[in-house]
Amino acid sequence: MLAEQTEENIRMAFGPKVLAALLLPKLLEPTDFVVFFSSVAAVLGSPGQVPYSAANAVLDGYSAFAVRSQGSRMLSIQWGPWKEAGMAANEKALRRASDFGFGAWSNDQGFAILEDLVRIGAGGVISAVSVAWERFQWPSYSSLTSNFVPAKRFVPKSELARSEPFSQTAVVTTLKNLTEAMLGHEVSAEEPLMDAGMDSLLAVEFARRLSREFGQVLPVTIVFDCPTLGAIADRIKRGMTTHGLGETTSKALPVGLTNGMALVSASSLLPFCFGLDSMLQGLDCVTGVPFARLDLDAYFSPDIEAEGMTYTKHAACMDGVEWFGNFFNINATEARTMDPQQRLLLDTAVSANCEALDGSDAAVVVGKANHDWSFQDHLATSFMGTAVSPAITANRLSFLLNLKGPSMTIDTACSSSLVALATAMRLPSSQALVGGTHVILSPVPFIGSCAAKMLSKVGRCLTLDASADGYCRGEGVAALILQPSADAKVAGILSVATNHDGRSASLTAPNGKAQENLFRTSLALASLQTVDVVELHGTGTKLGDPLEAASTMAVFGKSGKPVCGAVKSNMGHLEGSAGMAGLFKLICTLRNKAGSPNLHLKCLNQHISSNIIVSEACADLRQSTATLSGAVSSFGFGGSNAQALLMPGTRGKPSSKPHDLGGHFAWSSAAAWTYATRWERVGAKVTNQISLTGPAGLHCLEPVFIDTSQGANMLAISCWTAKAEEEEIENLTLRAIEMLRILQQAAASKETWFVVVAGNGAFAEACFSAVSSMLRSALCEQPLDVQVVHVNATTWESVRSILAETKLPLISEDPICRVVDGVLEAPRL
């Protein structure tokens, strides 16, 4: 969808289409005719296909100009679906086209149309699409057509009356009929829609149709929040009762504690660039797995479809994994054989002053979700059983420290370490040693995660960003010592809550309502209304980030304005020990009253509210005179969730150990204090003039001719200089990339944007055609306050003069228009 599109998508779409359109006529010098195969997506738009529609629209622009100005026999055919060849030649695509009222050409029909058009000497732009007008409905939020039969609203088979609110049965019946029309088969009320065949693209269209059918603004993530038709019906009914979506109240409280615990000592081993001060400086610690440990080059291929290979080599790794302090004089053979996670956790526990627990009834609970060591080839020794067993990771600590309380290793995937913390607080032991560990030792998880397309191709967690494409792997080890009613030198743990998604959209799909219930529980257990800081799970996924942001703001944003961020933007996703990384960052933030920057955030994901407060630089939280509090969230990909609420500790004695939280750690003078503010979009508010810069050819313009009393933004594109073909292709691509950014920003911010295309040649026509088509495709997904205006002029002075004398239509009526020879035109089919 729009938020997922990237510069790479634009270039991939423009390569085969635009390159051929510009170069082939020049190279071949045809004397009879030139025919381009465009798509109806260029004129109608198409949800999820902004780059594709733009590339086709370029062909249309060049053809229209060539015929109008040169009398050339250049023809661009905007084809509808072909059922035997091309992109629509599959059952799913054809069914989706049919739902919107489109037919599909056979090969014989398509070739006959082509033959007739060439024979009669057609030129310019012609749409060749089969449409059943009585069923035609296109998901556009703009006026594109005239003299069409109005699109018929979906009417349920039961012809339900609208004079009274729908009953639960009536709502479910309507949902079943709508789902059957989209998927081509019946779906039961309790069957997860993702299991029934609905993908993310259909889910967005499904949400759009539901909003129209029931008169409610439903989120595009509703299929993930409410995975079955029954659950969606419940939510719609609540909306009918409250004239909105209403609020989901928490059911029975999940497990947690109200009396809290004191974190008296802690130590961590994190990626090598990270001292605790580094968290506040916003360092990027992602590099790669050390070659001496693992040669990923042998398994690397840039082809994301290559089997048995990884398309990324990025990771945030610890230094010194091969070293072992061996404070307990373990047999050398056993030490070499044991999982490195066991010995690293031992060393980290010693740094956390675990000897103070010696001989007590302290519990040992370790979160561990990585079993790379079991993939390795080892010598067959008598230590193999204890070397690879997950249980021994905790049991060895209990044994060597002579701790007599419960001892267990917990694996709930990515939430393991926070669930371990929650479990420790529930146990009857008076004190506990809690650990989290994750070490990258094998290529197998890289290969498996790449096969599932879970890892980021750019090798970073682009948390909250529109271009987020998956997560980057990281590693770390941590140990905490908890005691009740003690001096909380490091932090006070106010509450820890856990729950499960239940039956979500799929086994691995997140659930926003489950997250909200978890957050309300953690607040209730701590007797708080909100917190000052939220450390997000934030792996950098297209749908996971918006879900978490929405659930976070729905609960914590109701009574406050917490500063949000994710340490994963610094050091990737530490998987089983991710909760510990977030917890250490949160402690650092609370104790220093400073929020660290959230890295790689350039354009907020369009499905995330712009009201979320994200720290782009080091955020000064000192303006708060009260004691700060914060939350850290962690979600397992199997649906096991956890959240901890903390307050800052009293700070112990200074420590020489850079990763030791037992003592004071100073604020680095290298970082500057700035106030946390709402996410600022690229581009200034239009007042007297705009200062917006971009790729070559994008200029500033003083928009004195536009009513900006309500505030707006402007992108002005000059297209009046002829270029060589190769340079013209790159310039068109750059303009499309800039337009994509504007659309993504408009979707995220809900602000007004004016895009002025100035010029009167073939290049200007192609550019206007492309950006207009991009807007149409974006409008197929959601309403946007964006207007594209083409001004037939060759200087900025002329543009300013023409628009000063022209009253532009309302954006809601005509989002696309042009001014030619003083006449305002609004394109229609």
Image (cartoon, rainbow, N blue to C red):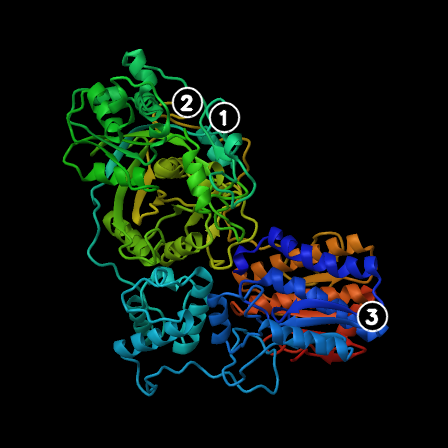
- Residue 826: x, y in percent? 68, 78
The Cα–Cα distance between marks 3 and 1, rounded to whole angstroms, is 61 Å
Task: Tell me the SS state at disc 2.
Answer: loop
- Residue 357: x, y in percent? 21, 23
Tally the numbered discs: 3
Front: mark 3 or 1: 3
- Residue 727: x, y in percent? 78, 53
The C terminus appears in which quarter of the rendering? bottom right
Q: Residue 58 vs residue 223: left or right? A: right
Task: Tell me the SS state at disc 1.
Answer: loop
Viewer-nearest residue: 711 or 822:
822
Mark 1 residue type = Pro
The Cα–Cα distance between marks 1 and 2, rounded to whole angstroms, is 10 Å
Mark 2 residue type = Val
Task: Report crowding for label 1: few under 14, some 14 to 19, many 20 or more residues within 10 A (C-alpha).
Answer: some
- Is residue 368 something that shows in the picture? yes
For label 1, the residue is 290
Q: Residue at x 47, y 67 (%)?
A: 91
Of callouts 2 and 3, the N-terminal one? 3
Asked if the residue under mark 2 is in contact with the one under mark 1, i.e. CB atoms within 8 Å, the reply is: yes
Front: mark 2 or 3: 3
Q: Is residue 509 above or below residue 203?
A: above
Q: Which mark is residue 321?
A: 2
Q: Is residue 85 above or below residue 495?
A: below
Q: Is residue 126 above or below residue 612?
A: below
Viewer-nearest residue: 551 or 544:
544
Task: Report crowding for label 3: few under 14, some 14 to 19, many 20 or more residues within 10 A (C-alpha).
Answer: few
Viewer-nearest residue: 3 or 729:
729
For label 3, the residue is 32
Q: Residue 224 vs residue 799: left or right? A: left
